Image: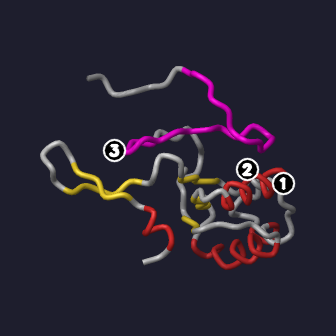
Amino acid sequence: MDKLDKSLIEAKDKSDKTISPLLPEDVKNYLIDIDGTITDDVPNEEPERMSTCMPYLDALEILNKWYEEGHIITFFTSRTEEHRIITEEWLNRHGFKYHGMLMGKPRGGNYHWIDNHIVRATRFQGKFTDLIVKTKEIEVFRR
C-alpha cells in the first residue's frame, strides 16, 4: 500500500454497503494536461519536440507547491504510450513532482466527464496560479 492508499477514507452507501473510498476533503486529486498546459502545445505527430520544449515556470512552481501540500498530481495527456518514456524523462529533468501519468486522453477537447464522484473542471488560459472560487453555470443531469 503506498502513501496515497493510506490517505483514502472508507465509504459506505445509504444501505451501509462499502463503496469506493474517498480522499479527505482537504486533499485534491489534480489531473493535469501536458501539451498547451505545462509546456507548449506539441502534437503527437511531432514527438521530436517533446524532449526540447521548455516548461511553463509558473506551472512547475504551482504544481510542485500543490504536491508538497499533499495533493495528488497526475498528468492526464493525449500523448500515447509510445511517448511515455520521453515524457517521464522530460518531467523528471525539469523537476516536476507527481504521482502518476495517464496516457491516451482523447484528443480534440470539448470534454464532458461523467462520474459518480465530484469533478471540477478548470480551463487553463495561459497562467498557473493558486485557484480561486467562482460561481459558474454548469450542465447537470435532470433529476
SS at mark 3?
loop
In the rendered structure, the answer to whether residue 83 lies left or right of residue 21 reads right
- Callout 3 crowding tier (Cα within 10 Å): few <14, some 14–19, many ≥20: few
Residue 56's disc is 1
Query: Residue beneath label 3, please?
Result: 116
Q: Amino acid at mark 1?
A: Tyr
Residue occupying the point 75% across, 37% down: 125
Identified at 43% across, 69% down, the residue is 5
Q: Nearer the viewer, residue 86 or 69?
A: 69
Q: Quadrant of the N terminus?
A: bottom left
Mark 3 / mark 1, whichever is N-terminal: 1
Q: Are marks 2 and 1 in contact (CB under 8 Å)?
A: yes
The region drawn magenta spans 113-136
User: Which color scheme did the rendering employ for the protein?
Assistant: secondary structure
- How far apart are the two marked residues, 3 and 1, measured between alpha carbons? 33 Å
Secondary structure found at label 2: loop
